[in-house]
Image (cartoon, rainbow, N blue to C red):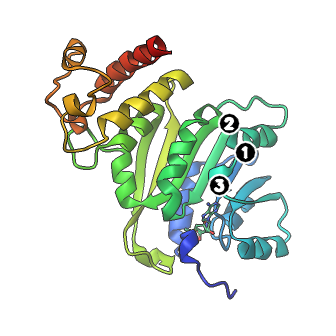
Amino acid sequence: MNHRARKRFGQNFLQDLSIIERMLAAMRLERDDPVVEVGPGLGALTLPLLERLDRLAVVEIDRDLIQLLEARNLDGLTIHNGDVMKFDFNALAAELAGSAPTEHSLRVVGNLPYNIGTPLLIQLLDCHEQIRDVHVMLQKEVVDRLHADPGTRAFGRLSVLMQSVFEVTPLFTVPPESFDPAPKVQSAVVRLKPRTDAPDKAFLAALQACTRIAFASKRKTLRNNFKGYLDEAALENLQINPQARAETLNLEAFYRIAKQLGDVQAVLK
Ligand SMILES: C[S@@+](CC[C@H](N)C(=O)[O-])C[C@H]1O[C@@H](n2cnc3c(N)ncnc32)[C@H](O)[C@@H]1O
């Protein structure tokens, strides 16, 4: 196959069969699972997925790769040509589930293009109610941020938001040689499962606003970042040290601030 990997689409194709096997084994697939693969590329994951599933949906942006996939006439494969960032996962969950309930049904898998890894994860926050689980390959540095603990260097907005909505389980690290072309950095596979106590839409919106403000300037104290939103006394009332920095707070502290901010927003309306 003479497709030249396109950098702008983050194309690093998986070559190492043992990695593909490990990813699939981690998923414990049942034949009738509703699965969507993001970025099938040349089909490294797609073909073994199809061997184990009755049907599979894929979303791919590169028309040349779509043509190659279409030419294979693969049974059970539904190909969506487009940008996954504009993709409606809720509609797909309904389509794949048929008449079955869609809640927590959709299984998402992919060796994600590095340029959209983080924004895609943020997008999945909004449709977590449709999702059963996510198994994706990302830059290891992003996976480190996903499951970082408060007070560590990797802990930030992404950690708070993702850990509030998903149980994050890093599975294994993947070296650059497993891909062609080889990326410059290590990769890792991570599993995300929606938490049973994931926040509802309104609270998630408050948490998104709260973390945007709290981490607006990483060097500044909470008092400074929250200026204009919550004053020092309000932070102290929430048992939060105004002189602390956002990366030292645990999830519960962010929830307390988000709840307060949510109330403030309601008063302002
Ligand atoms: C890292 S490659 C993985 C390809 C293949 N799954 C593999 O493991 O070899 C990422 C794939 O995502 C596709 N892609 C990049 N940006 C995309 C986007 N915004 N929407 C959908 N697919 C995208 C690329 O064209 C490429 O096929």
Residue 105: mark = 2
**Separation of residues labelled 2 and 3 (CA atoms):** 19 Å
Q: Position of residue 267 (x, y in %)?
A: 45, 11
- Residue visible at 66% across and 84% down? 3
Q: Position of residue 232 (x, y in %)?
A: 19, 20
Disc 1 target residue: 34
Proximity of marks 3 and 1: CB atoms separated by less than 8 Å: no
- The image quadrant in which ligand 1 is located: bottom right
Disc 3 target residue: 84
Camera-side residue: 136 or 32? 136
**Separation of residues labelled 3 and 1 (CA atoms):** 17 Å
Q: Report the amino acid beneath label 3.
A: Val
Would you say residue 198 is visible in this rendering?
no
Q: Report the amino acid beneath label 1.
A: Pro
Left or right position of 108 against 95: left
Proximity of marks 1 and 2: CB atoms separated by less than 8 Å: yes
Q: Position of residue 125 (x, y in %)?
A: 53, 38
Tag 2 or tag 1, which sits nearer the N-term? 1
Q: Report the amino acid beneath label 2.
A: Ser
Mark 3 neighbour class, 10 Å CA radius: few under 14, some 14 to 19, many 20 or more: some
Mark 1 neighbour class, 10 Å CA radius: few under 14, some 14 to 19, many 20 or more: many
Element under disc 1: loop
Camera-side residue: 249 or 194? 249
Q: Is residue 257 above or below residue 184?
A: above
